[in-house]
Amino acid sequence: MKSKPIVIEHFSTEHTSFILDFEFTNNITILTGDSGTGKTVSFSFIKECMALNPDIVCLNYLDYQKNIGDIIRNSEKKLIVIDNADILLDDDTRKYIALDDKNQYLIIGRNPKNLFATKENFFELVSERQGEQTVLRIKDYL
């Protein structure tokens, strides 16, 4: 399923020796890939920005006792970033996300079940050294 990003088309932040530089082409971006590629580190950098940007909501394994479905349903015009989505999202919440036209999602995980995703939704991290820094970007998966 491909739809234009409704909250943020470009997200960039610099953190010590890393630069996060993401171009979003879809309303639902599923970031997948092998362990150790920087997905959770990227989540951490975005979460730091959440304190200054009210358009960002970050959820991860530390939020497992919260009602994730209610948090998402009560959000509007947010970039909702979910790390460990395989653990946090139940089937009903996945279906809601797939049809949500009020928010944009960056979902970090490996299980796209019930998100009605197509290949246009799948991305992986790539890193590139630029001098002393490493730039992390997303690119089409496979």
Image (cartoon, grey):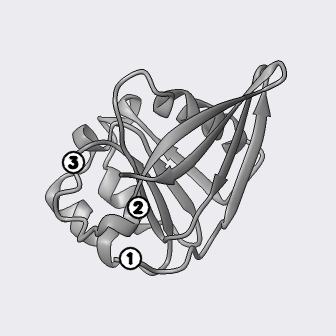
Q: Quadrant of the N terminus?
A: bottom left
**Circles 1 and 2: CB distance less than 8 Å?**
yes
Q: Residue furthest right?
A: 131
The image shows residue 74 at horizontal and vertical percentages of 44, 67
The image shows residue 44 at horizontal and vertical percentages of 58, 30
Q: Quadrant of residue 32?
A: top left
Disc 2 residue type (three-letter)? Ile
- The front one of 70 and 88 is 88
Q: Who comes first in sequence, dot 2 or dot 3?
A: 2
Disc 1 residue type (three-letter)? Asp
Q: Residue at x 16, y 58 (%)?
A: 113
Disc 3 residue type (three-letter)? Asn
At mark 2, the secondary structure is helix
Q: Residues within 10 Å of mark 2 (few under 14, many from 20)?
A: some
Residue assigned mark 1 = 100
Residue assigned mark 3 = 111
Residue assigned mark 2 = 72
At mark 1, the secondary structure is loop
The image shows residue 71 at horizontal and vertical percentages of 41, 56
At mark 3, the secondary structure is loop
- The front one of 21 and 92 is 21
Is residue 137 shown left or right of residue 115?
Answer: right
**In this view, the mark in front (2 or 3):** 3
Q: Residue at x 31, y 58 (%)?
A: 69
Q: CA distance from mark 2 to mark 3?
A: 19 Å
Q: CA distance from mark 3 to mark 1?
A: 19 Å
